Every structure is written in structure tokens, then in C-alpha cells.
Image (cartoon, coloured by chain):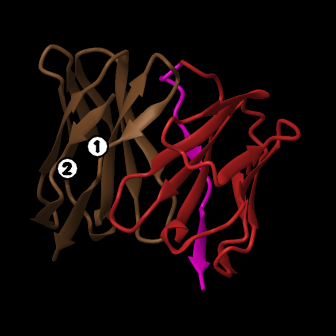
């Protein structure tokens, strides 16, 4: 089945130690999104790529960066994780930007814990 | 910016009908989407309204009134497996979605 796959499902890192979360998709979608979701809260958009065009949300901390080396893969890098960065990180894709008729397809998420 | 309001919790019994409301304030409004998320799982797309009126998909329906900045998700013939969080999300012409804080639906026997 065509899917959005996030690895790993659970990630533990130490305070201040860089960590990378990965997302791959077999849907061949143009747009990939990264969201942060804390317990009982809404998914909060961090950034998105339209093809190779990177779009950062204004309130995304500088600590968070992303790479999209090709259509299929997207990475979320957290340079110096703090305790407040513990959350579920969701990757999503959609076929075409600015066509809201296209739903977003989410991966199962990576739950990040900070020790 | 965007803001959305939806109830934090709703409880209903199996077989009943429940309506989850969503009001929003946004610029560049394009449409309203609804997603379901089970505990520990990914959000899954349920429904989208770009125009005023009712969209029906099986047991789920969604409604939009653009003039009132209001929409709702209607769940009929509730089943235990419908217990989940339901998010409304505003789609804007910038190609992004902003999610509400979610409504936790508990279905009781």
C-alpha cells in the first residue's frame, strides 16, 4: 500500500543531543509537512516543502531544521533538544499545494522523549 | 492568523447521533477539513467542505456555513470504535492547514 512511513516510532535522546527523525512516502506527493503535537493539543505546523521549496512557520524555533533530499524523503533535525521538545512529531503529505480538496496523509508519528 | 474553537469533550452512547461544532476566524479561508485521531495513532482524513452545505460520507457528514464561519461534523449510528479525538482544520489559500485543539469523543455502551 502507498503510505507515509516514519522512523523510528519511538525515539529517546538526551538533553542537548542532536536527533534526526525521518519520513518517507510512496505516494509521490509534492508537498511534505512536519507537525509537532503535544499531549491533548492540536498538531502544530513546523514547516513544509512544496517540492524543494522550503517554507518555515514564523514561530518555529531555530532549533528545528528540515531537509528534503528528494521527493520521497524528508528529515526533521533538532539540533539541541530541550525538555519542551518532547512531543509526537507527525509527517504528512499532500498531492498538490493550495488545493485543499486534497487531504493530508499522515504517518504514524515519532514520539520523542528527552532524558 | 487563524483561530478555531471546538468543544474539548463530548460523550454519547452507542447508536446515538453526535454533532461536533467548529467555529473559526481566518484570513484566506479556502475550506474546512475534519480528521479523526485515535490514541497514539495518526490523524486520518474524514471530510472536507469547500462550499456551503452538507457533505455526506457514510455515517459521517460535515457541514459548512462560510457566512457564519461555522462548521460541524455529524456522526450517526455511533460505534465504540468512534471513540477518538476529532479535529477541525482550516485550509487556507496558502496551502496550509491550521488545526483546532480537538474534541475527545467518548462513546459509551
How far across and down, in percent of the image, does residue A3 sit? 70, 50
Pick whichever, B79 or A60, lies toward us.
A60
Q: Which residue is mark 1?
A: B60
Q: Is residue B62 magenta?
A: no
Chain under numbered label 1:
B
Residue A91 at x, y = what percent?
Answer: 62, 50
Left or right of A64? Residue B66 is: left
**Among all residues in the image, which is located at the extreme bottom?**
A115
Pick whichever of labels 1 and 2 is earlier in the sequence. Answer: 1
Query: At 12% from the left edge and 65% from the top edge, which residue is drawn?
Result: B11
Separation of marks 1 and 2 at Cα, in angstroms: 6 Å
Q: Are marks 1 and 2 in contact (CB under 8 Å)?
A: yes
For residue B101, above or below residue A69 = below
Determine the colour of chain A.
red
Query: Which residue lies under the disc numbered 2?
Result: B76
Left or right, B89 with reference to A102: left
| Chain appearing in brown on the rendered image | B
Looking at the rendering, in which quadrant would you find the C terminus of chain A? bottom right
Give the x, y percent position of residue B87.
Answer: 33, 48
The foreground one among B48 and A86 is A86
- What chain does mark 2 sit on? B
Look at the image and tell me whether residue B49 can be seen.
no
Task: Residue at 34% x, 67% y: name it.
Answer: B81
**Magenta region: which residues?**
A99-115
Residue A6 picture quarter: bottom right
Amino acid at each position: 500500500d502507498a503510505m507515509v512511513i516514519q522512523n523510528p516510532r519511538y525515539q529517546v535522546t538526551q538533553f542537548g543531543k542532536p536527533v534526526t527523525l525521518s519520513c518517507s512516502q510512496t505516494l509521490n506527493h509534492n508537498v511534505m509537512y512536519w507537525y509537532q503535537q503535544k499531549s491533548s493539543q492540536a498538531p502544530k505546523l513546523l514547516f513544509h516543502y512544496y517540492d524543494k521549496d522550503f517554507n518555515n512557520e514564523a514561530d518555529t524555533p531555530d532549533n528545528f531544521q528540515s531537509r528534503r533530499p528528494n521527493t520521497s524523503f524528508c528529515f526533521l533535525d533538532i539540533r539541541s533538544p530541550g525538555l519542551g521538545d518532547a512531543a509526537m512529531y507527525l509527517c504528512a503529505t499532500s498531492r498538490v499545494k493550495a488545493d485543499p480538496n486534497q487531504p493530508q496523509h499522515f504517518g504514524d508519528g515519532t514520539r520523542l522523549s528527552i532524558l | 492568523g487563524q483561530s478555531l474553537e471546538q468543544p474539548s469533550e463530548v460523550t454519547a452512547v452507542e447508536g446515538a447521533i453526535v454533532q461536533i461544532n467548529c467555529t473559526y476566524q481566518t484570513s484566506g479561508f479556502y475550506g474546512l477539513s475534519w480528521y479523526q485521531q485515535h490514541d497514539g495513532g495518526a490523524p486520518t482524513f474524514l471530510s472536507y467542505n469547500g462550499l456551503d452545505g452538507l457533505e455526506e460520507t457514510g455515517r459521517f457528514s460535515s457541514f459548512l456555513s462560510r457566512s457564519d464561519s461555522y462548521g460541524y461534523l455529524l456522526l450517526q449510528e455511533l460505534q465504540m470504535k468512534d471513540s477518538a479525538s476529532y479535529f477541525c482544520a482550516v485550509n487556507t489559500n496558502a496551502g496550509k492547514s491550521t488545526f483546532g485543539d480537538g474534541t475527545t469523543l467518548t462513546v459509551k455502551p
